[in-house]
Each structure stands twice: as structure tokens, then as C-alpha cells.
Amino acid sequence: MDPVTNKPLLNQPSLNQQVRNLLEENGLAYEIIDHDLAPTCDHSARHRGTSLTIGGKSLLFKSKRGFSMFVISAACRINSNRVRKILQTQKVRFASDEELMAVAGVEKGALPPFGGKLLECELFIDETIFANQKIAFTCGSLTQSVVMNVSDYLTLVDGVRVDCCHPPETKD
């Protein structure tokens, strides 16, 4: 993105293409799944035919430190108190739609989990991601997802391992 106009640079590949290039350049196995519009993690999992648990939900926060991405299992909810503690600040909020577009060039729900690698923001990866063998995530579009091995994903990113989710809800 051009920092002045907040528009994509003419010769810069889309975030979707940057992710695909990164996977190809590293020779990693992955599956691209084209699907109907999926504005939520639940929709994405249903369209992909995958468990919500393997969904990697990427959340972009804004604080005095700048932008920070937290990647959690789509089956979980973020614990904002833990996020504040991790970021060592009392004031933290979700990035606005405009900020998400300026930082990543994507709309809400389409942010892939590559903070610190393809996007200029800190990356924090919740324990819930490490608990799975696969990770599925939208790839810069609400109509396309990637499914790959967590171990391969972790070779591509330099994130801090954290515990930032509420405990999973149990159904009695």
C-alpha cells in the first residue's frame, strides 16, 4: 500500500498473491479452496468443509505500540485482558475497517495470518493454533481459503507464542 494515498501500489501483487508466492517459494504443500462469500469464520469453515477449530482467525489490534496481529483458533474468543497484558498497555482496540484496508489492503474477515512477514505488524500466535495439525485461513479474500500444515505455517512466520484466548466453552 502507498502510505500517502492508502491505495495499492500499481506493480505490487495483492496480499493473496503474496501469500501464494511465499508458499510456492518455500516449496510448501497447501490447498487453495475457492468458496462462496464467507464473512465469518463459521461461514468459512462450512464452505471449506473443515472444522472451525483449525480455522486461523487473524485479529488486528491497534495500541500505543502500533498494529499487532493475534492469530487464534476460530473456535475460540480472544481475551482482551490478556491482549492488554501481552501488549503492556491498557488501551487497545480492534483496527477499524479503514485501518485494516490501509495496513493490509483487505476487508474485515479476509486477513491472512502473516503479520511480521508480509505485513508490518507484530505477530502473536495463540496456543490454540499449536494444538492443531492443520490451519485454514482466508487468503486476502472472503471467497478463497488456504489449508496447510501448522508446522509448515510456523516455518514461515516469526510470531510470539502466547495464551490469549478465553477457555473453550463446554456444552453440557
Image (spheres, rainbow, N blue to C red):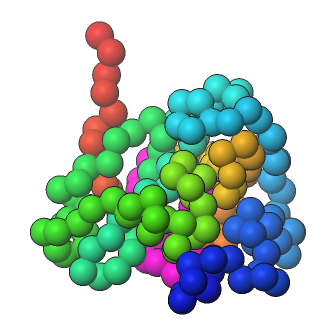
Q: Is residue 49 above or below residue 154?
A: above
Q: Position of residue 104 (x, y in %)?
A: 57, 70
Q: Position of residue 11 (x, y in %)?
A: 82, 84
Q: Position of residue 33 (x, y in %)?
A: 80, 41
Choose top left, top right, bottom left or bottom right for residue 36: top right
Choose top left, top right, bottom left or bottom right for residue 143: top right
Q: Residue furthest top?
A: 172
Q: Residue at x 29, y 10 (%)?
A: 172
- Residue 89 vs residue 30: left or right? left
Q: Residue at x 39, y 61 (%)?
A: 96
Choose top left, top right, bottom left or bottom right for residue 38: top right
Q: Residue furthest front?
A: 5
In the image, is residue 116 part of the stretch drawn in magenta?
yes
Q: Residue at x 45, y 51 (%)?
A: 72
In the image, is residue 24 part of the stretch drawn in magenta?
no
Q: Residue at x 64, y 26 (%)?
A: 46
Quarter containing the N terminus: bottom right
- Residue 71 vs residue 110: left or right? left
Q: Is residue 74 above or below residue 148?
A: above
Q: Is residue 4 above or below residue 109?
A: below
Numbered range of the magenta stretch = 112-129
Q: Position of residue 52 (x, y in %)?
A: 55, 33
Residue 13, can we see it?
Answer: yes
Q: Say which of 157 and 42 sits in front.
A: 42
Q: Say which of 5 and 59 sits in front.
A: 5
